Amino acid sequence: MLHNGKSMPDPSASKLPLYVDLDGTLIHTDTLWESLVALVRQNPRGIFYVLRALPRGKAAFKHTLAEQVNLSPLDLPYHEAVIVYLKQEKDRGRSLILATAASEATARRIADHLALFDAVLASTANHNLRGTAKRDAIAAHAQGPYEYMGDHAIDLPIWTSAARAHVVLPANADWHRSIPTAQRGERFQALGGTWKNLLRALRLHQWAKNVLIFLPLFLSHVFTDPAKLRAGIIAFFSFSLSASAIYLVNDIFDIHADRRHPEKRLRPFARGTYAIPSGLLWSGALLVVSLSLAFLLSPLVALCIGGYVLITCLYTLWLKKIPVVDVVLIGFFYTYRILVGAIATETMVSDWLLVFSAFFFLSLGIEKRYGELLRVANEPSSSLHGRGYHKEDLPVVLGFGLNTAFLSLLVLAFYIRSAEVTKLYTHPFLLWGVVLLLLVWMMRLWLLAHRG
């Protein structure tokens, strides 16, 4: 029966020592990949030092990585049902041992944090505790019958040697049927690996932003040209696929910051509901398709898409930590979409539009950061984690946002009075209604933001 983490302990149950796997079992994620991500975030050059240990074997690689990264056990997504079950067993007096292929240093930090385990078996600099190697280490340590809890088919040799086999079962997995029925113990459901989690990580709803690619067509009144419309559609999907690829990378490298955020902690990678290596593979595949579509239009469009990818990667790894620079780039990314649309469709775009969009979207970017700062204003932390802002900055950020909002409307007002408008519109005075609507909308937006 599927364990829901709420059942009462059975007094007649076995008190044999229980050996528990770490990655994918005790936690929803993989500490090796978590450590690699943390290393790239904290010290990108350190990755070359760690890679030099790879020829000496995976055990040496894990050991060297653990020396470079102090992975905090506080940030990891624990399997709550498993934790509840282990606490029940601990209260009954059962001996619990953490048995993992993760590095010994990482495993001991997690074991110390949870205060559940009586001992730790883990990989050392010379010995990778995985598969049959883990089985032999457990057998030598137990000196008799034991039970084991794991989540991967590679653990089958351990389960078949154990008195009882407890499994954390990923979606659509059927390898657990190889375990003899008489040996089957508790079964827990893993969270990750489904298409639903992948689609959520791709943030398909954010593709709506890329409609800005069509803006030059509409404002130049050439949206009825089939060739230009076709180019705009190709550019839209090319940009959207590259954006989703970057969202995957961004969420992977923001894992630790997202877990401390009241809303972002529910993102697939932060929760551990989608695996980091799968996310990286999908990101690479999407980029290949995106650039292939861009080349159908022209090398220049492909270069623009590549430039967007490069800048957003720099933003993810470094620039988003710099106050003001981060929000300027957020605004720039929106204006960049308009530029890509103009290049892809070979349509002229006015300086007025670019300046207006720069100020308008900069204001929206500042509003986003202001809202995040407002949410942490009453928390013990004095800063917005991973962003470089402090709650004392709230009045200044508010000033930035309001000023850029009104500047964008001022630019739009000047545009209506320009000679270019009379060439495109029969009744240009009607555009003042757009200014009025945007004025009311922006003022209401900032009022609601200020109210939290």
Image (cartoon, rainbow, N blue to C red):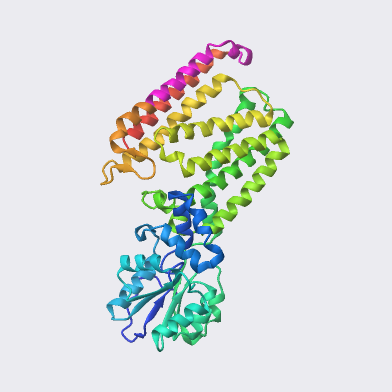
Q: Nearer the viewer, residue 425 or 234?
A: 234
Relative height, residue 142 to residue 281 (above, below): below
82 lies left or right of 359: left
Q: Nearer the viewer, residue 119 or 191?
A: 119
Relative height, residue 206 to residue 188 (above, below): above
Q: Position of residue 231 (x, y in %)?
A: 70, 34
Q: Position of residue 94 (x, y in %)?
A: 32, 81
* Residue appearing at x 48%, y 43% in the figure: 316
Is 416 covered by the magenta stretch? yes
Residue 306 appears in the picture as rendered: yes
* Residue appearing at x 43%, y 81% in the figure: 138
Q: Nearer the viewer, residue 297 or 51?
A: 51
Relative height, residue 65 to residue 289 (above, below): below
348 lies left or right of 123: right
Q: Which residue range is magenta in the image?
A: 402-426
Specify the quadrant of the image occupied by residue 108. bottom left
Specify the quadrant of the image occupied by residue 141. bottom left
Q: Position of residue 347 (x, y in %)?
A: 67, 25
* Residue appearing at x 44%, y 63% in the figure: 28
User: In the image as oriented, which residue stretches furthest toward the bottom?
Assistant: 144
